[in-house]
């Protein structure tokens, strides 16, 4: 009898066996030489943990809050287009799994099911991720998200031009024809303008109707929902976020899928935390694969982290159950790491629990 996967890397290996090659590549790919994608993992591995002992760690609690919503573990599901590429139940399965695990799911503009269908299936809080591809489209999406009960809008800003994923270009990747972009059922003219999300490989010029800093005001005027900005990589842009009244900042390099040659996401966290000085919540994604990675990110100032590719691995292996298992494996590993670090609550995960290269060690 085959054992269940015991960690996320087992899920990755099984998903690779289960998925057709071009779909596998679409999920795993990074931009150009995939240096940033690899660096996300390398940099996390380089953050050493500093365990603390002789502490009573019974009654460990992994829960926290994000924008006032309680979640049972500080790991959320990142916005990602096209969950049906890994399982026919797509985002419905992912949303159910998130609800079962007691965490939050970010739904992509490029989802296969509509935001209303996902909201009806979900058992927990949802955030709607917005790709701005025109003022009229953004306005329509934000109003629908508010109507459908989403708890926040997350604007992804790191796609000013389409992403260069060369594996997709080689494979002539197109969205599987049996799937749709659920937020735009029957809206052909809108669909034509949605290029340059994670879905398209063509080189197109920059978008014709972009959003810029002063216009965040306009976006905020559309809704009373909190605003998260995703894709921030520098202290400078983090400071601008705060000046524009943003509620949450997602330190992310899109899993290395948009621009190659940047710092890893975890390396950008300290300068973002320093610039924000507690004036907005900070989250981080990119390379989180172990409970210890969650501790690393929280110790460096993140309120919570998100996972992208692993949710597809869970879907490919066993749909809703697979995604739930992925989250539960991370929860168990997180509990174990917290236990070693002598902390019983997420608030107890502080800077002293990690050592950056050169601080204490010399490897
Ligand atoms: C297949 C796939 C599709 C994605 N689609 C989107 C998207 O539609 N919107 C977005 O903001 N980020 C998207 N992302 C990026 C994720 O939100 C996240 O930043 C990244 O996957 C985190 O890195 P990880 O995969 O190493 O966990 C996508 C990622 C993957 C793997």
Image (cartoon, grey):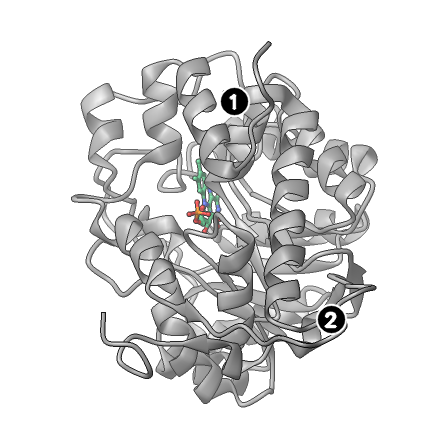
Q: Position of residue 107 (x, y in %)?
A: 62, 44
Q: Measure the C-alpha gap from mark 2 to mark 1.
A: 34 Å
Residue 289: mark in rendering: none
Within-10-Å neighbours for mark 1: few <14, some 14–19, many 20+: many
Position of residue 56 relative to residue 323, above or below, is below
Q: Which of the image's four quarters has the N terminus?
A: top right
The residue shown at (32%, 62%) is 43
- Quarter of image, res 39: bottom left
Residue 345: mark in rendering: 2
N-term mark: 2 or 1? 1
The residue shown at (71%, 29%) is 92
Position of residue 278 relative to residue 97, above or below, is below
Does the numbered disc 1 mark a residue whose Cβ is under 8 Å from ligand 1? no
Q: Position of residue 111 (x, y in %)?
A: 57, 34
- Quarter of image, res 60: bottom right
Does the numbered disc 2 mark a residue whose Cβ is under 8 Å from ligand 1? no
Residue 86: mark in rendering: 1
Q: Residue furthest front?
A: 54
Regarding ligand 1, which quadrant of the image does it lie in?
A: top left
Res 82 visible: no
The residue shown at (51%, 83%) is 352
Nearest the viewer among 116 and 80 is 80
Q: Is residue 243 left or right of residue 71?
A: left
The residue shown at (25%, 38%) is 165
**Label 2 SS:** loop
Position of residue 171 relative to residue 359, above or below, is above
**Label 1 SS:** loop
Position of residue 201 relative to residue 67, above or below, is above
Q: Is residue 152 left or right of residue 270?
A: right
Q: Position of residue 13 (x, y in %)?
A: 41, 25
Q: Is residue 333 left or right of residue 269?
A: right
């Amino acid at each position: 009898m085959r054992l269940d996967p015991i960690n996320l890397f087992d899920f990755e290996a099984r998903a690779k066996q289960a998925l057709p090659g071009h779909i596998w590549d679409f999920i795993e790919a990074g931009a150009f030489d995939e240096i940033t994608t690899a660096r996300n993992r390398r940099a996390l591995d380089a953050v050493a943990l500093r365990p603390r002992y002789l502490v009573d760690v019974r009654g460990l609690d992994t829960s926290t809050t994000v924008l006032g919503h309680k979640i049972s573990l500080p790991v959320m599901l990142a916005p990602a287009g096209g969950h049906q590429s890994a399982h026919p139940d797509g985002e419905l399965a992912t949303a159910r799994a998130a609800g079962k695990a007691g965490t939050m799911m970010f739904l992509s503009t490029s989802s296969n099911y509509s935001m209303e269908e996902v909201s009806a299936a979900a058992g927990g809080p949802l955030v709607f991720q917005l790709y701005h591809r025109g003022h009229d489209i953004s306005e329509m999406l934000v109003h629908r998200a508010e109507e459908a009960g989403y708890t926040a809008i997350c604007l992804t800003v790191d796609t000013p031009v389409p992403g260069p994923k060369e594996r997709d270009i080689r494979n002539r990747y197109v969205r599987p024809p049996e799937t749709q972009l659920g937020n735009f059922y029957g809206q052909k003219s809108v669909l034509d303008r949605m290029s340059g999300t994670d879905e398209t490989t063509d080189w197109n010029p920059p978008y014709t109707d972009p959003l810029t800093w002063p216009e965040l005001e306009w976006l905020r005027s559309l809704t009373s929902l909190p605003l998260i900005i995703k894709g921030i990589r520098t202290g400078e842009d983090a400071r601008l976020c705060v000046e524009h009244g943003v509620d949450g900042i997602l330190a992310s390099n899109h899993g290395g899928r948009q621009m190659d040659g940047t710092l890893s996401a975890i390396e950008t966290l300290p300068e973002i935390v320093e610039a924000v000085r507690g004036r907005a919540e900070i989250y981080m994604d990119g390379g989180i694969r172990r409970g210890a990675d969650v501790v690393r990110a929280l110790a460096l100032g993140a309120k919570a982290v998100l996972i992208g590719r692993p949710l597809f691995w869970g879907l490919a292996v066993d749909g809703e159950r697979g995604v739930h298992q992925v989250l539960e494996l991370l929860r168990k590993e997180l509990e174990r790491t917290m236990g070693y670090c002598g902390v019983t609550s997420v608030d107890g995960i502080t800077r002293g629990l990690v050592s950056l290269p050169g601080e204490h060690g010399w490897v």
